[in-house]
Image: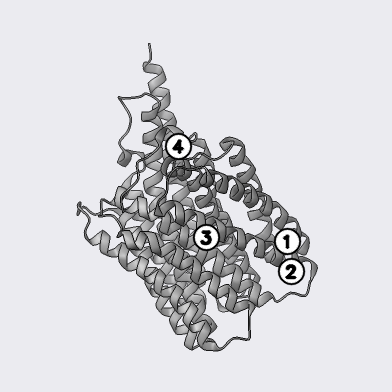
Amino acid sequence: MKIISLNTEQAPPISVPLRFFTAAPLFLLLAALTLVSGADNPFADIHSPALLAATHCITLGFMAMIMLGAIQQILPVVIGSSMPASRLTSWLTFLPLLSGALLLPAGFLLGKPVLLDLAWPILGLAFITFISAGLISLARAPAHNATKTAILLSILALGGAIALGMLLAHGYATGSLLPYAKLATAHISLSLGGWVLLLIVGVSYQVVPMFQLTPNYPKWLGNGLAPAIFIVLLLILLSLLLEPMPHWVAIVVQGLFWLLAGCFAVATLWLQSKRRRRVADATLSFFRLGMMALLCAALLAFATLFFPENDRLGTVSAVLFLLGFAMSLMYGMLYKIVPFLVWFHLFRGGVKRGVPNMKEVIPETWMWRHLWLHRSTLLAALFAPWWNAAAWLVSLGLLLQGMLLGYALLIAIAVYRRTLVRIEEDLP
């Protein structure tokens, strides 16, 4: 599998992805404050309002912001097809997502059904706009490659996840009689296993070889992994719909999912061990941490299949997937993509002199500090279901990470603007 050429002439304005990226750290601050809003340890009960609210701050406010912003850059540049009406699409996605990602956690935390009933149509508008524009862009894209396939399947999974999420939020708000446990399981499977994992897989096919100087992913893995994960997710949904099912069926289909996820982690770690440049790199370390966390999450998920009564074991597996895998990779990608965007948009504007090197956009010392802070936060999260003090440490870690990441992104924006001003002053 080869890295496809970049279609730089179709890139959207730098403001399109950056508005999503710079809003994301705010939701880490909100997640931290949410976790300490009650007197009890929210990690001890997976159904606690504080944990539900904080989880949606992270998934909707932080992760979705980053992923939606990244895709609006990736589709035109990597896939070769711009989003229709890219500026309008960006605002029609960003503003409702920002509003809904504030309202939904508030509804969970405060126990206010009216906020939930207000949040789901607003979020629906954001995601329907994005999904429609994304599918149109993919349909007219000339490229036919593994990255395009993975992104398409991730968007389809997102559509299912959003439909279920809207149904659940409306049900909670109105008190409707619904099979909440089954719907919630299906919603989580499509959100994390489909949307998050498949998008990371597709983006990694390009980011890992290009930025980390590794060999390409094997062609058989690139062509087969994303469709296999998607098919297994459909089987998981089918097993939920056809319950009661024999327990061994759930073990087989869920085991297949975690086996495929583990294969992706092992393949990425193997490629990173073959990289041409052996210099220590903070973004690479974020990726390695994420892949190791995914492997540990898979092992714990296997254990929960045989010991389903142990809720806290499942909580740790979910923490490893969310904080350890997904967030680590998003940090690693942000710290590569944002400096690249700053350099690229300055260079594309015709500037040949005075453009800062990518390493000068965000100081690497900040990235290393963030890595150590993230590791500490993840370690505390692993003990949080059993140790109340660890829950406070997780909150503190998320708070500091949000502040650090936000400051790093503001540094990048300041470098971009300062360089533009200097260039304009040098013009005759």
Residue 386 visible: no
Residue 370 lies, in percent from the top left, at 38, 55
Q: Which mark is residue 172?
A: 2
- Which residue type does callout 4 highlight? Ile
Residue assigned mark 4: 413
Task: Give the number of the mark in front: 3 or 2.
Answer: 3
Mark 4 residue element: helix
Seen at 59% across and 45% down, the residue is 133
- Which residue type does callout 1 highlight? Leu
Task: Give the number of the mark in front: 2 or 4.
Answer: 2
Query: How many neighbours does mark 1 have within 10 angstroms: few (below 14), some (14-19), or many (20 or more)?
Result: many
Q: Which mark is residue 116?
A: 1
Residue assigned mark 3: 195
Residue 386 lies, in percent from the top left, at 50, 81
Label located before the other in sequence (4 or 1): 1
Distance from Cα at disc 2 to Cα at disc 4: 41 Å
Mark 3 residue element: helix
Distance from Cα at disc 2 to Cα at disc 1: 8 Å
Asked if the residue at tag 1 contacts the one at tag 2, i.e. Cβ–Cβ closer than 8 Å, the answer is yes
Label located before the other in sequence (2 or 1): 1
- Which residue type does callout 2 highlight? Tyr
Distance from Cα at disc 3 to Cα at disc 2: 23 Å
Seen at 60% across and 68% down, the residue is 187
Label located before the other in sequence (2 or 4): 2
